[in-house]
Amino acid sequence: MPREPWTPRLGAIAQPDGTCTFRVWAPFVDHIDLHLTAPQERVIPMQRDVDGTHTITADAPPGTTYLYRLGAVERPDPASRFQPGSVHGPSQVVGRDFDWHDAGWTGISLDETILYELHVGTFTPEGTFDAIITHLDALVELGVTALEIMPVNQFPGARDWGYDGVLPFAVQNSYGGPDGLKRLIDACHARKLAVVLDVVYNHFGPEGNYLREFGPYFTDAYNTPWGTPLNFDGPGSDEVRAYFIENALMWIDEFHVDGLRLDATHAFIDFSARTFLEELAATVHAHADRLGRRVSLIAENDRGDDRLLRPPELGGYGLDAQWSDDLHHVLHTLLTGEHVGYYRDFGLFPQLVKALRLGFVYAGDYSPFRERRHGSFRADLPGRSFVVAAQNHDQVGNRMNGDRLSALVPFEALKLAAGIVLLSPYVPLLFMGEEYGETAPFLYFTSYGDPDLGRAVTQGRRKEFKDHAWEGDAPDPQDEATFLRSRLNHDLRGQSQHRALLDLYTALIRLRKERPALRALDKERAEVIGYERERVIVLHRWHADGDALIAAFNLGEGEVSLALPVPVGTWREALHSADARWMGPGYTPAAWTATDPAALTLPPQSFAVFVREG
């Protein structure tokens, strides 16, 4: 029996007969006129319900542009699906018809997920969804199984990270609009690539933010680093929650996305008995079940709070996974030697052992940076609960000069970082271009139309870096050159060390997919041993079917020899980062039948992987 189609409640809802139902929740406004601006200009009064919802059905086929007239001002639809001009201009009616080809697609599990994070505007010279499609086959060849796309909702101008959006339902016009995004997702599914979309439910950007004129979407009861927070627990918050939950359902139902990455969930201020995050997770998972699909909710959270990941019956919020910044931070500090800012909390060798063993470092431990205890993670959280990375948009882009790891560490250390992330019992994430050692920075860029706001952003960015003792002048986010410097150079993929690094990433991902011991994100079948004096970590992973693997990582700057406690069996080398095929310095091959501890010599900043035969 076919399921009932999901019908949106807010925005311009196109009807099969060519009419359109316009609906907006605006309790702050006594009367709203619908101003149809093209192709035929008309002004039509809307009807107001007792709860402040304004509704009208009019002849307005897809392509019709419109504004809401609130007394003396006209504003775009808060649930606009498309802004053909800007965040200030008319919204456009969008039809729901699209020729999808993914009827058999049901998504992938987190155990199968290898994420590839990208920014649409800088991934290609064109900066569009359609241009990404031409690179999908290369990503499939690399072995990634899911794209994680930075926010695509409408922001001011044509250059932005996407976290300053103000119209969460509208797909950025300069990227290709809603149909462009659907074409990209359909093309991904044709190649068995899942799509995770980054969404921002914790704040709105400063330009074009008209939502506060419609209703109590914001609250003055609290404050955040981004200003007045959204109202998830005060008067009128039921409708505010419904607005964002409908947004999540739209991405899943209308756009067929396979997951949502929830930006900065630590910035949600919500003292409800049942929080917005709990309601969102329950609603999204129930809808995915009705669709017969897997949909994952992945949080970014700075608190180290395991309640996010626990099921509701155990007092949790029911999210599926979260970014594990702890592993990134300790790996970064050990490879670069940096200890400024939040990196003060990291840099100890045993912390990397703990991060690989548990998925986190801080679980109620004292944080020097925060000057208090931090985190509440427990050891029983499964490996699929954590997304780990050596690089991502935050950790690269929030550096003053947008330095990628390729600009900070030697080539051998890049390979070492890849091995630690991709052989870990967690969900790995690669940041666009990482796989071939992209040299372009990823800088912070904006394109605000308000000159005063643009100057304030530039000055604020420069002050922030001076306060953190960064030397030199920060690039101007408003300067188009800052954006252009951040574009990838895909031609590097075939050149010298870049090609060798790409081949290594490909081999590591292939190994991860082929070996049951690596595919299963099972911390209970993963042993991590740290040799602090030698700066070596040994990772032993095994599977119930007998498959087993040992990886040894030398984080030191000198060659080391040590005896490995190897389980009984015949072991052969599957991969060595110092191999000449990866443009390494060379090494002494090793293979053994384990009865006594096996001797292994590792060159500086290298790793070796051994698999058990039979």
Image (cartoon, rainbow, N blue to C red):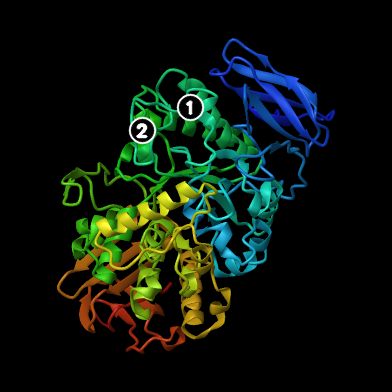
Q: Classify 283 as above or below 187.
A: above
> Is tag 2's residue or tag 1's residue first in the polypeptide sequence?
1
Residue 56, image x and y in percent? 73, 20
Q: Quadrant of residue 527?
A: bottom left
Mark 1, Cα crowd under 10 Å, few <14 / some 14-19 / many 20+, is: many
Mark 2, Cα crowd under 10 Å, few <14 / some 14-19 / many 20+, is: some
View extreme (top): residue? 50
| Left or right: 613, with 166 as reference point | left
Residue 516, image x and y in percent? 45, 61
> Which label sits in the foreground, 2 or 1?
1
Q: Which residue is mark 2?
A: 316
Camera sees residue 153: yes
Q: Looking at the figure, which quarter contains the C terminus? A: bottom left
Q: Nearer the viewer, residue 136 or 203?
A: 203
| Left or right: 533, with 442 as reference point | left
Amino acid type of disc 1? Tyr
Camera sees residue 1: no
Q: Which residue is mark 1?
A: 217
> Could you tell me which secondary element the residue under label 1 belongs to?
loop
Residue 253, image x and y in percent? 64, 38
Residue 400, image x and y in percent? 36, 63
Disc on res. 230: none
Amino acid type of disc 2? Gly
**In 3D space, how far apart are the residues under numbered discs 2 and 1 (Cα atoms)?**
26 Å
> Could you tell me which secondary element the residue under label 2 belongs to?
loop
Q: Classify 236 as above or below 117.
A: above
Residue at the location (50% across, 69% down)?
485
Q: How many marks?
A: 2
Q: Looking at the figure, which quarter contains the N terminus? A: top right
